[in-house]
Image (cartoon, helix red, strand yellow):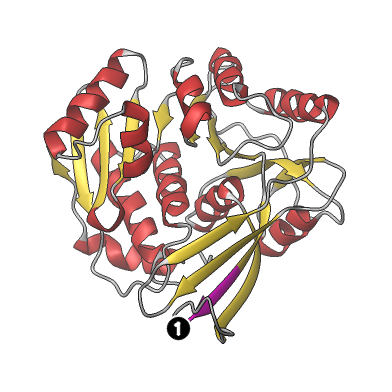
Amino acid sequence: MVSWHRRRCALIISLSLNPCIDKSLQIKRLDLDNPNRVTLNRTDVGGKGVNVARVAHTLGGDVLLMGFDYDGQPVHHAMEKEGVPCRLTRAEGALRVNLKIREEDTGRTVEINEKGVLLPENTLLDMENMLLDTCKPGDFVSLSGSLPNGAAKDMYASLTQKLKEKGCFIAVDCDGEALQLALESAPSLIKPNLPEFLALTGTKDASRPALLALCREYHKKGVAMICLSLGAEGALLSTEEAAWFCPTADVQVLGTQGAGDSLLGGLLCALSQKMLLPDALVFASAAASASVMRPGTLLCKKEDALSLLPGLQAVRL
């Protein structure tokens, strides 16, 4: 069993409220009228919170995975194999399954995600109490992914407020109404991708000046940092004082699943190690670029990320 113990240094706590089994299939091209031959078949325990913990741990961060586990403890067993410390709340029922089908010829991916079992209020409260009992001032807490079935839509907003009162750095990576409500509690960091950010702001203008202007509006509302994933183009990190852009590395893309989680995991790892912000963005971008070098839902390797660092540079905007 991977042990967990209280630490005196800053900890990265990745909260996984809605983990899943990621079933990844790869085919040449999807044919809706005929049988399709699978060229790659992989099954992993995943979800954004799990992935962020994995990446931060792989890159050398001091990590604890929290959240829910289900019948048979699949999340616990997967983390035990990888050496990722975890402290999970048991929930009754089977872990949901997410199916991802990637076309080799086009690189397009179709995702079919299950909703998951309904969690009772007492189970949600047990998890929250465990989280608040565990975190300490200065810890980094990542709230990422979809909310579980049964959770209030303002759950991330509520947790953000309570974690701020504990003196934690809170990163939020979700979308839709959950993100809109969380912003009312002014998390330390948000990490939307470009479509999520445009939907949040209600604009179609994706030019660099427009994006920076929108970031400044959220800084005025108390959000200290925004890490905006721009897909194949790169990533932008904005604060009230400055902003930087880092392009992606020139690598062969075998899969894009988990690239955003690798970006966030790398960024939190860098911030927890007190890297300067432009260096933290480069470190995170290297992790994201290393992630797409691997097929399916496989995440970055530390050696790949480190090998990409010399070729990346953050440019101040």
Q: For residue 34, which quarter of the picture?
A: bottom right
Name which residue type carries label 1: Lys
Q: Secondary structure at mark 1?
A: loop
Image height of 30 relative to 150, above or below = below
Characterize the local packing of mark 1: few (<14), some (14-19) or many (20 or more) Cα atoms within 10 angstroms: some
Residue 212 forms part of the magenta stretch: no
> Magenta part mainly helix, strand or loop?
strand
**Where residue 80 appears, x then y in whole percent?**
73, 59
Q: Is residue 296 visible?
A: no
Where residue 289 sits: x, y (%)? 34, 62
Residue appearing at x 45%, y 83% in the figure: 28
Q: Residue 184 appears at what percent x and percent y?
A: 46, 15
311 relative position to 23: left or right: left
Is residue 23 at least partly visible in the picture? yes
Left or right: residue 240 compared with residue 299: left
Of 41 and 300, nearer the camera is: 41
Screen quadrant of the C terminus: top left
Which residue is drawn at the image coordinates 76% and 23% (left, top)? 129
* Residue span colored magenta: 24-28
- Which residue is identified by label 1? 28
Which quarter of the rendering shows the N terminus? bottom right
Q: Nearer the viewer, residue 205 or 146?
A: 205
Indicate the position of residue 203 as horizontal and vertical percent values: 25, 31
Q: Residue at x 43, y 45 (%)?
A: 264
193 or 110, which lies in front?
110
